[in-house]
Image (tube, rainbow, N blue to C red):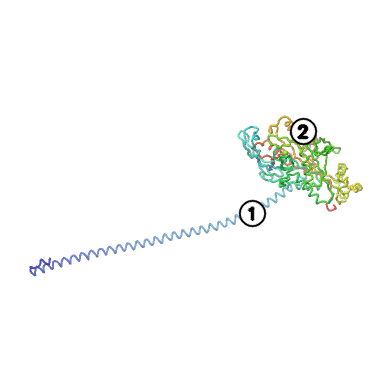
Amino acid sequence: QYQGLAGRSTNEVLQLYSAHGQQQKLQRRSVVTQLHGAIKRLKQDLKSLHSFALELLKDFQRQSETYLYQVLTAVQGIQLQNEAMQMFQIKALDLQQSLQEVTERYEKEKQKRRALHNSLVELRGNIRVHCRIRPLLPFDTAAGHSISQDGQRNFSEKVAYAADDETVLVKCSRPGHASINKTFQFERVYNASESQDTVFADVGPLLTSLLDGYNVCIMAYGQTGSGKTYTMLGPQLEENFAFSIEDESELGIIPRATQEVFRLISEKPPGSYWVEVSVVEVYNNEIFDLLAKDSCGKLFGVKRDVITTREGKSDVPLLTYETVENASEFLHLVNKGLQLRVRHPTLVHAHSSRSHLVVTLTITTIVSGDNFGTSWEDEQISQRLNKEVSCTFPQKMRDNKSTSSSRASSPVQLEATEKMKQVKTRLQLVDLAGSECVGMSGVTGAALRETSFINRSLSALADVLGAIAEQRPHIPYRNSKLTHLLQDSVGGDAKLLVMLCISPDQRYLTESMQSLGFGTRARQVQRGQVKKKSLPVPSKAK
Ligand code: ADP
Ligand code: MG
C-alpha cells in the first residue's frame, strides 16, 4: 500500500495514513473486547468448576460419613454377635453340664430303681427275663434259607431292636399285613453289638448267690438259630467241639460260670466246697445221661428216668455225677459229653440242636452244726436238707485223697462229728431246643417227630409257668420230662433267669413274637421268695 504512495500528495498520504491507524485501532479494540469476553467466560467456568468441586467434596464427605457409619454399625453388630455367641456358648456349656448332671442322676435313679426292682423280684420270687437280640448274620440271607412262609422275600430286614437296655421294639410293616409296633420290657435287653462279656457281667451276681446258699438256674429260650447255644456255650465249631477255647472272649455263660464258681470257691477255706457235674440231654421226651461210661470207660448216652422223691423233689436215679476240681477239667468233661448231643440240621440253621441240654453243677458245702442256722426257718431247712442231702461223699472224699487242710475235709472227722452237715446248692444251665414252629423249619419224618416233641415240652414249660402264675393247686410238671427234670428250679427253689434269644430278621417275626410273649408271661410269674440254704457264717469259717 505504502509503495503505491509514491507520487501522491502529502494530504492524500496523511489521509491514507490516518485511515489506516483508525482501522488498526478498531481492530485492536475488537481483539481486546474478544479477550475480555474470553476471560469472563473463563472466570465463569472456573467459578462453576469450583462450585462443582465443592459439591463433589461435600458429596464425598457425606458418602464417607455414611460408609463410616455403616462400617461402625457392622463392627458393632459383629461385636454384639460375638457377645451373643459367647453367651450361647456359655449357655450351651451350662446346658451340657446340666444334661450331664441329669444323665448322671438318671443313671443313679435307674440303678436305684433297678436295685429296688431286683429286691422286688427277689421278694416275689419272680423269674428274671433277659433278652438278647443277635446280629443279622450271613445265613439269614443265604440261598436256600430264604424261603419264608409266604415265599416272597429273600433279603434280610431287621424288625427287632433293643430300644434301650430294658426295652425290645418290634417294628414291621409289610404290605398285606397289619403293621406291628410293639414294645416288650425285660430286666435287661442286649443289642446285637453287646458282647459275651457284657452278658456274663449280669449273670455274675447270681453265681455269688449260689455260694451264698441259693440254687440258680439259667436257661436260654428261643427259636433255632437265635443264639441260645452261642449265649450258653459260645460259637460252635465244625468239628463238633462245644467250646472254642482259642478265643476266650467268645466263651458263653456255661464255661464262664464254671470259671467264676471255681474263682469264688478259691476265696473260701480250702476243702470246704466241692463241685460235681452232670450233663443231661432231653431228646424226644427221653432223658440221656451224657456222662455215663461203658465198661471201657468210653462215654455213651444212657437213658435215665426222672422221678419225684418222697419229699416232692425231682431226681434222676443213677445219674452220673463227676467231681471236677477246676474249670478246665469241667470244660474237658462237658466237651466230651456234648459230642453225644443229638443234632439235626434244619432249613433255619445247619447246626441246630434238637434236644434240651441241662448242665448241672452241684456245689456241696461242709457246714458245721454251730454255724448251721438257728432260726425257725433255718431249722426247717436244716431238717429238709438233712433228709435231702445224699449221705455219700464224692469218690474223692471217700477215698480220702483230698489234699485239703481244712478240718471239714476229712471224712473220718466228718463222720465222727455229728455236727457236720453238707449243704448242696445247684447251678443248672439249660440250652433249650429251638422253639420254632414246624412249618418254618421245613422238617419232615423223624425230624418232624423231634420238632413235635420239642414243641410239646416247651408248651409244657409254658403251662407250668402259667399254672404257677395262677397259683393253681396242681402244677403239671409231669406232663413232660423237661418240666419234670427242671421242676425244682422252675417251681421256686431256684433263682431263675430266662435268657430269651431273638433273631432280628423279619422272616422270624412270628417266632420272635412267640418268644417275646413267652418271656413276658414268664416275667409275671410270682413264686414267692426263693429260700436260702444255711451256709456257714463267713467270719466263723476257717
Ligand atoms: P441256637 O442255639 O439258638 O440254634 P446258635 O447259638 O447256634 O443258635 O446261633 C446260630 C448262629 O448265629 C451261630 O453261627 C452263632 O455263632 C451265631 N450267633 C448267635 N448269636 C450271636 C451273636 N450274639 N453274635 C455273633 N454271632 C452269633
Ligand atoms: Mg443251639
Above-or-below relation of 398 to 2:
above
Residue where numbered disc 2 is placed: 284
Q: Quadrant of residue 192?
A: top right
Circle 1 residue: 98
Instruction: Give residue 161's position: percent from left, percent from top.
Output: 66, 42
Sequence-earlier tag: 1 or 2: 1
Q: Is residue 144 above or below residue 212?
A: above
**Labels 1 and 2 touching (C-beta < 8 A):** no
Q: Amino acid at mark 2?
A: Asn
Give how far apart the Cα atoms at labels 1 and 2 are: 59 Å
How many neighbours does mark 2 have within 10 angstroms: few (below 14), some (14-19), or many (20 or more)?
some
Residue 476 visible at all: no
Residue 305 at what x, y percent from top left? Answer: 82, 35
Nearest the eye: 299 or 76: 299
Look at the numbered disc 2 and say if its residue's Cβ is closer than 8 Å to ligand 2: no
Q: Nearer the viewer, mark 1 or mark 2?
A: 2
- Residue extending furthest right? 416
Q: Residue shown at 49%/58% (left/top)?
A: 74
Give coordinates of residue 182: x percent, y percent.
66, 39
